[in-house]
Amino acid sequence: PLSKEGTFISKIKARISFSGLKEAYSVKRRIATWNFALMMIKDRPLLGSGIGTFQYNSLNYQAKFFEQGDNRSIYPHGYAKEAHNEYLQLVAELGIIGLGILLWIMIVYFYKGLIFLNKTEDNEKKGILIGLMGAVVAVLIDGIFSFPLHLPATLVLFWLFLGISMNIITEKKSEQIENSIKEESCHLINIYRYKSVFRIIIILLFLLVSMTLARPFIAKIYLYYGNIEIRKKNEDEALHLYQKALKYDPYYGHAANSVGRILKNKKIYDKAQEYLERAEKTFDAHTLPSELAMVYYRQDKFNEAEEKFKKAISYQPNKKSMVPIYTNLGNNYFKMGEYDLAKDAYRDALKIEPDFVQAHFNLSQVYFRQNLQREAVEELLTVIRLAPDSKEAEIARIIIHKGVQEERERKEEEKNKDQEK
């Protein structure tokens, strides 16, 4: 009775069960991410793909991973901005050389730290250093399953701990260096005559660096307010804000993608193509290939559209979301006159969703082009059965009625010819 629905124990059981499901999902997601991170490493093992590029390459390599065997059905889909393993991500972005540099820093750090602990008799410094080294070890272990060095707070603390540790370790050496500098300072006294000039140069450099660093941040603010306007369905104001974001950061792919989508909705396809292609260089999203494919399709650039439709299919989070893209790919082949390929694409859509009306209707048009009248009529009848009140069903009735009339006229014509003979 305590396990009945609504009781305290039943709620605890439900929560434990949900937590277990979430944990299983998280583990599978990490395994998938590690696998396609290894694929990235395999492609560029020495120097990597560049710092900060993991999230840009993530969807592309995830798509390749899901194409292998049953991976799509085994592992959950997602968008991994981080690899959930600092070392895999480091090698993916900076290659074996990057990992080697980090290992060298860590080896030198712990080597010097352990030597200092063995030699020093200052218990206070010993205690502080052990605490700092323990914190560094904790971050390094956490990096096996997470991304602490991509979290600003942890990143700052990590390097701060290293810096304080090295300051403790090299304190005596620092004093010796300071004394030698004082001895040499008499030779450098003339430099202080130009102190004001140096100050002005430093201030100018500081302002330049500050403005350079501030521009991407300002661009993100404009993007944020642009997204608010989109939610209000105010596309014109959103477009204005997104374009302002691009003025501050011309390489901000997210903003370029947003501009491209609005221009596509406004049917300004040439400009939409320009912005979406610009976005593609520095940004990636599940929707980007399909948006770009439709822009190409609307401009009769069918070869380019075909490539992007195929990429869009591989980017989808589940099979159901592939259905409209398979249908659009079929439409693209139909326009190209590739009727067999169009037929295959529509059938792929129907394998996933057998009752998808648009695919049945479009498939009927392919059959008509191939003079397969009976198969075409069967598809039209399926459309009428599945969605009797739809626009497609209305057109299907007209086509069938017209076909029946033409068949009657043909038979009557043949009958008249026979009578004349």
Image (cartoon, rainbow, N blue to C red):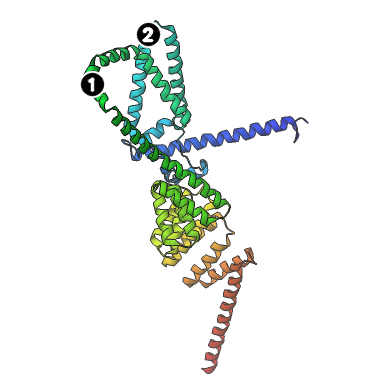
Report the residue at 74% width, 30% height from top.
8
| Quarter occupied by the N terminus | top right
Decide if residue 4 is on the left or right side of residue 94: right
SS class, disc 2: helix
SS class, disc 1: helix
Q: Are marks 2 and 1 in contact (CB under 8 Å)?
A: no
Decide if residue 97 is on the left or right side of residue 131: left
- Depth order, front residue of 329/49: 49
Residue 123 coordinates in the image, percent (x, y): 43, 7
* Residue 143 can be seen in this image: no
Residue 217: name its quadrant: top left
Q: Say few, some or many: other residues with alpha carbon within 10 Å of mark 1 (under 14 / 14 to 19 / 20 or more).
A: few
- When the figure is inspected, residue 225 is found, relative to residue 163, above or below; the finding is below
Residue 172 disc label: none
Location of mark 2 (residue): 118
Q: Amino acid at mark 2?
A: Asn
- Depth order, front residue of 136/220: 220
- When the figure is inspected, residue 376 is found, relative to residue 80, above or below; the finding is below
Residue 114 coordinates in the image, percent (x, y): 37, 13
Q: Amino acid at mark 1?
A: Leu
Which of pointers 2 and 1 lies earlier in the amino acid sequence? Answer: 2
Location of mark 1 (residue): 188
**Which numbered mark, 2 or 1, is in the foreground of this view?**
1
